[in-house]
Image (cartoon, rainbow, N blue to C red):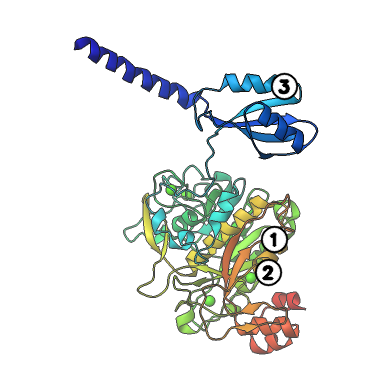
Amino acid sequence: MQRNLKIIGISILGSIVLELQCYFVCANYTDKWAVRIEGGEEVARNVAVQYGFTYFGPIIDDYYTFVHRKVAKRSLYPSSYYHRSLASDPKVKWIEQQVGRRRVKRGFRDFNDPKWSRMWYLNRGQGLDMNVRAAWELGITGKGVVVTILDDGIEKDHPDLKDNYDEKASYDVNGHDPDPQPRYDFSNENRHGTRCAGEVAAQADNYICSVGIAYDARIGGVRMLDGDVTDSVEAQSLSLNPQHIHIYSASWGPDDDGRTVDGPATLARKAFYDGITRGRGGLGSIFVWASGNGGRDFDSCNCDGYTNSIYTLSISSATENGNIPWYSEACSSTLATTYSSGSGGERQIVTTDLRRSCTETHTGTSASAPLAAGLCALALQANPMLTWRDLQHIVVMTAKPFNLHDSDWITNGVGRRDQAHHFQFLDKSIFSKGLYARLKMYIHMSSASLSFESSKGKQMTKKNNCLSREFNKWLH
Ligand SMILES: [Ca+2]
Ligand SMILES: [Ca+2]
Ligand SMILES: [Ca+2]
Ligand SMILES: [Ca+2]
């Protein structure tokens, strides 16, 4: 009895060892052989029959598949007997018993970040999200691209940001020091920059919080809103390290009260111009701008000289259900929209938050601009040679109006639909090396901007009194 148990014990152990060995080395032999025979299919058929094989069909050129009915469909060991007899025929130039190989579909797997399942604007699929997973599957994750958030600072030691944090893309303009850590208070007033940063480059698959759109990009922050914002503060922020930073994301501007007409002053204007002419080795810095939250007060982003500048890529919002949000300002200078918050029942944006935490309640066009900055980072990884104008062109030309609902859609003179455009970065001619990133953004433009395209600006200038000189110059 004891002896029997021992034998069973050994055989179980033996099979475990075999299993473990096979996990690394054992082959999975099939009942098929690939055989090279010169002289054509008929010769191959005859050889098969001669050695008891069944001719299965051609593979390529002089290679054919034979199958042997007496061989198991799957075996750990090769069938040397039948192999040797077939190989002995002089007409057989090469022969190999075929082995089943483990191959895994390279589909998209979900992340382990706890809030990933809540990131509806990235994971809904079916044309209802920003389609970044298609880019990620191509290995486009923002690698090598540097983004900075011009805001109230960045929590650089946040566990979901610290590995992507880039001190060369950071500065504290308010405090005149290199450390942009936000100033902490009871109301967490200075959480904005940290929230925006996580949307772009929160680390993926680290069991922490969320996933940034460009989760392998480097991210910095400029602390410049927590103090007096002067022309020099803006200019210094917009021109930080322009040979290192590729994309600047700004979610601020003049009052959205429906009465203010304001824009960049002397130094900030110079910073924009220097950025697009000299930044990124002359390809031009990318300035992504939130279009403003003054919809309730009928504010127009055309009256905001920052979004209105031709040098900024101005971004508005669409809600979870594809509607125009209550805070949205419709205007012709907006190039695109990305998803953001909406009305009560609609979900908001998930991102990193102050005090090393995580939030599902980031809102407004403030949340949209960083998503667009993340998309631009993906595009720049796909093709780092894109100029600042190329990127604007891609955004406009690849927009698609899926899932965006409104009654005043029109088709403009170049066949683009206006009011709410769904952007899709997809342009093999622009993404060099055959790479293309299927990235989607949403566009939301006023009817005025579309009529401008059909009438070369004349109609638009009539409808929009706040167009800057720069913008008019661009139209003509
Ligand atoms: Ca500081
Ligand atoms: Ca994470
Ligand atoms: Ca505004
Ligand atoms: Ca603009």
* Figure check: 151 above or below 161: below
Secondary structure category for the residue under label 3: loop
Q: Residues within 10 Å of mark 2 (few under 14, many from 20)?
A: some
Label 3 vs label 1, nearer the camera: 3
Judged from this view, the residue extending furthest toward the left is 1
Give how far across and how far down residue 434 sits, in percent.
72, 51
In this rendering, the count of numbered labels is 3
250 and 183: which one is in front? 250
- The three-letter amino acid code for the residue at tag 3 is Asp
Residue 242 visible somewhere in the drawing: no
The answer to the question of whether label 2 and label 1 lie on touching residues, with beta carbons closer than 8 A, is: yes
Answer with the quarter of the image where residue 347 lies.
bottom left
* Whether the residue under disc 3 has CB within 8 Å of ligand 2: no
Which residue is labeled 2 in the image? 397
Viewer-nearest residue: 425 or 86: 86
In which quarter of the view is residue 413 placed?
bottom right
Q: Position of residue 178 (x, y in %)?
A: 53, 46
Q: Is residue 206 left or right of residue 463?
A: left
Q: CA distance from mark 2 to mark 1?
A: 9 Å
Q: Secondary structure at mark 1?
A: loop
Q: What is the residue that sits farthest to the right in this orientation?
A: 39
What residue sits right under mark 3 in the picture? 89
Mark 3 neighbour density, 10 Å: few (under 14) some (14–19) many (20 or more): few
The kind of residue tagged 1 is Asp
Identify the residue position indicated by label 1 in the image. 427
Residues tagged 3 and 1 counted as in contact (Cβ below 8 A): no
Considering only order in the chain, which callout, 2 or 3, is on the residue closer to the N terminus? 3
Callout 2 secondary element = helix
What whole-number distance in Å separates the C-alpha atoms at marks 3 and 1? 54 Å
Q: Look at label 2 and name its amino acid.
A: Met
The mark nearer the N terminus, 3 or 1, is: 3
Left/right of residue 258 with respect to residue 356 in the rendered view: right
